[in-house]
Amino acid sequence: MSRASTTPLDGIDLVLADLDGVVYKGAGAIPHAVESLNAAQASVKVGYVTNNASRTAESVAGHLSELGLTVATDDVVTSPQAAIVLLQQLAPAGSTILVIGGEGLTSVVEAAGFTVTRSADDAPAAVIQGFAPEVGWKDLAEAAFALKTPEAEGGIPWVATNTDWTIPVARGIAPGNGTLVSAVHTAVGRLPVVAGKPERAIFDAAIQRFGSTSALFIGDRLDTDIIGANRAGLRSVHVLTGIDRAKQLLPADADSRPDFILGDLRELAQPYPEQIVKKGLGGVVKHRSGDAEVVLDGSAVTLTKRGSEVDNIRAGTAAVWGSGKPIYALDVDAALYS
């Protein structure tokens, strides 16, 4: 399909943006993100969706405002907010809940009328777990003690805000809530119900809050952002300013492929390059994006004309995805991912 005259924002009434790796990395804004999202807000609603459970929606909105974004607290949808919806379906109203996490989680648990405990000895009705830098071994042990009995045998429910394996911070990539959830899973041999990306709960909460009928989700991770948006039926943008880049995009399966790949958020309002496919003799297929050209010849995927990084990736993914073969069955030019 030709997209030569369209931008990623065409036909959209809501932009939902992930935060870590899309808007900011650590405390600082990612180049071009703030001005691009403010510009988008002139024509569409803009909301922010985060799996990070360590901060309240108010504190996130405050941080975004300090970066220069025009944002209110209700513009921020957090995984704890989505997790509370699940918790209310699983635990009696007003019951005691073992919370593994920080203020971003305890504040919404208390606001929903539950009582917070930090000890399995208080006979909690459920466990809810989210990331916070201060979560340590003792907290994970309390969760394991509370969850030792399988739910099928009368044990209590377990809700996780999200299962992101990593989180980008100013100094690099650090372990995320998924690693902490995995530690408890290893101890108790059971899995939680998950609210955050890539599960639908957080996307459904955002769509309902903004009343959208045609939303676009922007993320930097395939395993949470893009697969989650696809599951929720949203159009998706992958931006190359965070975690996943060519090495992750090229082998992406059908469920994890974005509708658009952008170098940075300035390209939201720019015409998306036409993705040209030309079939030649002997089954050779040429894929072009901008100045980049990638040729698929049998099992060989070769960058024959170099363009910008993002156009190289666009043409490369088009060739790999269009081949109908898994990445391990192809000989992919190292210039596409090095």
Image (tube, grey):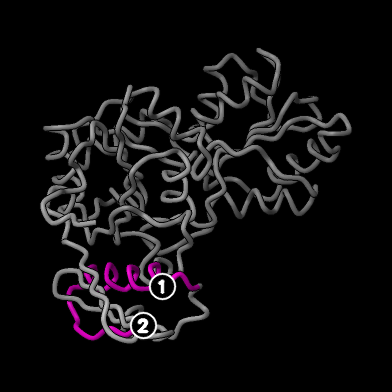
In the image, is residue 126 above or below residue 100? above
Q: Which residue is mark 2?
A: 301
Query: Which numbered tag is attached to residue 205?
Result: none
Residue 285 as seen in the image, left or right of residue 98: left
Most common secondary structure along the magenta stretch: helix
- What is the quadrant of the N terminus in the image? bottom left
Q: Magenta segment range?
A: 301-325
In this view, which residue lies farthest toward the front? 281
Specify the amino acid type for callout 1.
Answer: Ser
Q: Which residue is mark 1?
A: 323
Q: Secondary structure at mark 1?
A: helix
- What is the quadrant of the C terminus in the image? bottom left
The earlier-in-sequence mark between 1 and 2 is 2
User: Alpha-carbon distance for marks 1 and 2?
Assistant: 9 Å
Between residue 114 and residue 88, name the one nearer to us. Answer: 88
The residue shown at (22%, 38%) is 66
Question: Could you tell me residue 81's position as x and y percent?
Answer: 49, 28
The residue shown at (32%, 73%) is 316
Question: Could you tell me residue 195's position as x and y percent?
Answer: 55, 36
